[in-house]
Amino acid sequence: MLQQLKEQVCEANLRLLREGLVILTWGNASAASRVHDLMVIKPSGVSYHEMRPEHMVVVSLKTGEIVEGHLRPSSDTPTHLEIYRAFHSVNGIAHVHSTHATAWAQSGREIPALGTTHADHFYGAIPCTRELKTKEIQSDYEKNTGLVIIERFKKIDPLHIPAVLVAGHAPFAWGATLNDAVQNAIVLEQVARMANETLAINPKRQPLSKALLDKHFRRKHGASAYYGQKKK
Amino acid sequence: MLQQLKEQVCEANLRLLREGLVILTWGNASAASRVHDLMVIKPSGVSYHEMRPEHMVVVSLKTGEIVEGHLRPSSDTPTHLEIYRAFHSVNGIAHVHSTHATAWAQSGREIPALGTTHADHFYGAIPCTRELKTKEIQSDYEKNTGLVIIERFKKIDPLHIPAVLVAGHAPFAWGATLNDAVQNAIVLEQVARMANETLAINPKRQPLSKALLDKHFRRKHGASAYYGQKKK
Amino acid sequence: MLQQLKEQVCEANLRLLREGLVILTWGNASAASRVHDLMVIKPSGVSYHEMRPEHMVVVSLKTGEIVEGHLRPSSDTPTHLEIYRAFHSVNGIAHVHSTHATAWAQSGREIPALGTTHADHFYGAIPCTRELKTKEIQSDYEKNTGLVIIERFKKIDPLHIPAVLVAGHAPFAWGATLNDAVQNAIVLEQVARMANETLAINPKRQPLSKALLDKHFRRKHGASAYYGQKKK
Amino acid sequence: MLQQLKEQVCEANLRLLREGLVILTWGNASAASRVHDLMVIKPSGVSYHEMRPEHMVVVSLKTGEIVEGHLRPSSDTPTHLEIYRAFHSVNGIAHVHSTHATAWAQSGREIPALGTTHADHFYGAIPCTRELKTKEIQSDYEKNTGLVIIERFKKIDPLHIPAVLVAGHAPFAWGATLNDAVQNAIVLEQVARMANETLAINPKRQPLSKALLDKHFRRKHGASAYYGQKKK
């Protein structure tokens, strides 16, 4: 079942490797099939060099049970499930430990919107979650990781800011499609790198004005977008 | 029309990708045909992997109208037009969001001439524009981006310093030829990277002396140049 | 003798090159055969491009004598020997001068556990040895390098923190298997890079809580591990 | 004439490109034939992609005149000549604008010996020249660049510290052979990179002790060296 989605999820995971966002067996991408109420996700700890579509694991969005697949799903599966359950507009998730975005997550600080590259893709600072409490860590850790993400997005549209930094851990990026999720993980890494360097050059630099943030985000997103070609 | 120029512009855009100055669909290069009063520019938001010369868009330098092409031109087209209209010695432009030059642009600071690598290509600091005002952002944003660049170059020969940082955005590089423009974008990125690292090592380091700046720029440019081979 | 182990050690050394952890003839990996009381190690100063399994040198763990091989073993051989003699659970060692881990070693500081990437592989800060005394440098330097490593691990299980920084020098990583040792050297480099960047963003950032450190290390190691696939 | 040396010099220049130490047409390597009192050097401003052994230029070490070759020699030729004339043990020179070593040169600071990687190849800090005076810049600039290098090495054996930073410019590396010169340029770049990062982690870190510096340099150089294989 979901053969095409398995191929897409496998390919998305391999793209994370090619783009330099993951090493070894780190990282995981998934996609939701809302019509089936299912998620397809990378197996846990399998070498990227041996990974094939048939290794992908199909999981019920409702119950979290494995519906198809011979391998264990990614250990971060409960985090993905919570995100899909809370963010109905999201259909793809990419979790990576990419160098610069992870450094920001480890620092416990949000990434301010310091340039139009950021504003083209993220409509404001990339938020950082609070630290998990000891009991949230000791029991249902991966599910609770999802819940602190959702808590942080109470007042944020997840498609306006399609990524989060989990404090002390690493980023999760997402999107309306799997392709958007992977692309947002790529852009996040570049934005994180440039933000760090910007503040090294000018530690007092303030975020973009609201006008410039609006201009760039709206140029690419929503009804008045004029970047790219007309959608067929 | 302008078949050869389309091929050159397509190839210049692809070179920006190969040189690591752009990712995804970012960046755009254009060239002017002064004799035809036309500009050839990359289409907006098209994948580099599918880009071919016939996708290039031909635009009137005078009116800004599309003269040939089935795709929308780069959303930065009005910025390119203003640069060609004001800088008559410029025949090629390359706009990129390359990591280090963009970090400087985001920081709102000019790049001081800290070494002879800089002086070989840029005859002084790489200037940074002022921030655009809210009304300049909300209406005719890309045209106004061109105008603040020109404003910044009131007292600068654009072939003496063939690049600018747009504050909060990214660099534009240019040249007497398209090849020069691309090359200047490459050098700018390297110069930006080394300037940041130089100041990390020695925060109080002052720019080069006028004598050394003169020596290196004149060694490569103008009547007394002696770098490279004699032009045939 | 030990033909298979020679092939594995040769391949491990070549992998260090491919992973960007060594340049020129730097670095060395070795593996122990506990049943034979022998160690197989890279020869000293041989080009990676010409290195073949038959160049590997077999050394007695007990006496340090060369048992087989036409070339001199790595000049760091006495350090490897001391590690194998003291850490009985260790069967592979990788020594590299990789950029970021070496910068930490040169700085004389331990790498704090600032993120879960670190905690997934190292159960606490990566320790840094004390400086060697002048007489420890002038006589039996490489053996004494091993001894200060062991001194530093008096109260640490070497499989809980499978790497060390030798102050002013570079890291040694190890593992229960040669493959683990190489993998730990790769992870160490990434962890070192992100730690430096984390502290540049937030100089006052504290290490992970004990709860989060426990959670991530135990998720991957020991009886309650649930990362990856079930071992066959 | 000197066909073999031309091939070696051409290959050395191409290796600088492959190793990432030069871009565009930057950098130049040369070799001396002491028995002929000649130097073979890269031509000025020629693309690396088109460079062939027959493009190399043969120059008299005594007079600086071109003895063979159809192209102009590197504009840095007078600097190379002064180095060969003053340092009789040097037979190869590599000049690059590699990122990290150039940042140190631009900063005007010597690179302290902060680790054994440095000490394995350089017997103390990599010195930085004084700034050239205005009249030294305006007349015979490249020759004077050579002279300030020699001035800086009055009390230093050039084979003990086979590289220099020219203040505000970039490094020159050299060696007893052309291959050593290229290798020293590679090591210098890595050492420069790690030194900068070491001081970012620990700004007060002091250079290695004399004992450790001696140990590592002597391990690889001179009569008591024991690194690598016995010379045949």
Image (tube, coloured by chain):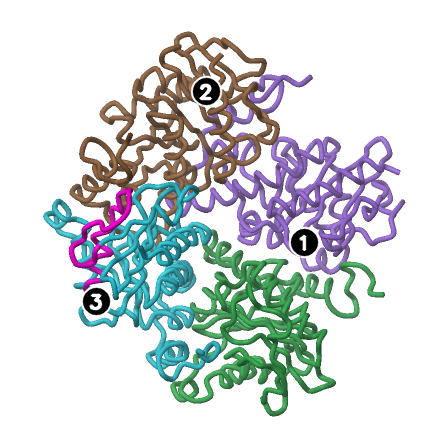
Chain colours: A purple, B brown, C green, D cyan
Neighbour class for label 2 at 10 Å: few (<14), some, many (≥20)? many
Identify which residue is drawn at 75% across, 43% down: A10
Closer to the camera in the image, A155 or B213: B213
Question: To which residue does mark 1 refer?
Answer: A26
Inter-mark Cα distance, 2 to 3? 53 Å
Residue D44 in the image: state x and y as whole percent: 30, 44
Q: Residues within 10 Å of mark 1 (few under 14, many from 20)?
A: many
Residue at the disc numbered 3: D153
Residue D71 lies in the magenta-colored region: yes
Local SS, label 1: loop
Q: Are marks 1 and 3 in contact (CB under 8 Å)?
A: no
Residue at coordinates 49% horizontally, 61% vertically from top-left? C100
Q: Which residues are magenta?
A: D60-87
Estimate the spatial distance between the alpha carbons at disc 1 and disc 3, rounded to whole Å: 50 Å
Q: Is residue D127 left or right of residue B74?
A: left
Name the element at disc 3: loop
Q: Which residue has dot 2 on it? A: B5
Whether residue C114 appears in this view of the structure is no
Residue B79 found in image quarter: top left
In the depicted view, which residue is nearer to us: A72 or D164?
A: D164
Q: Report the front residue among D54 and A181.
A: D54
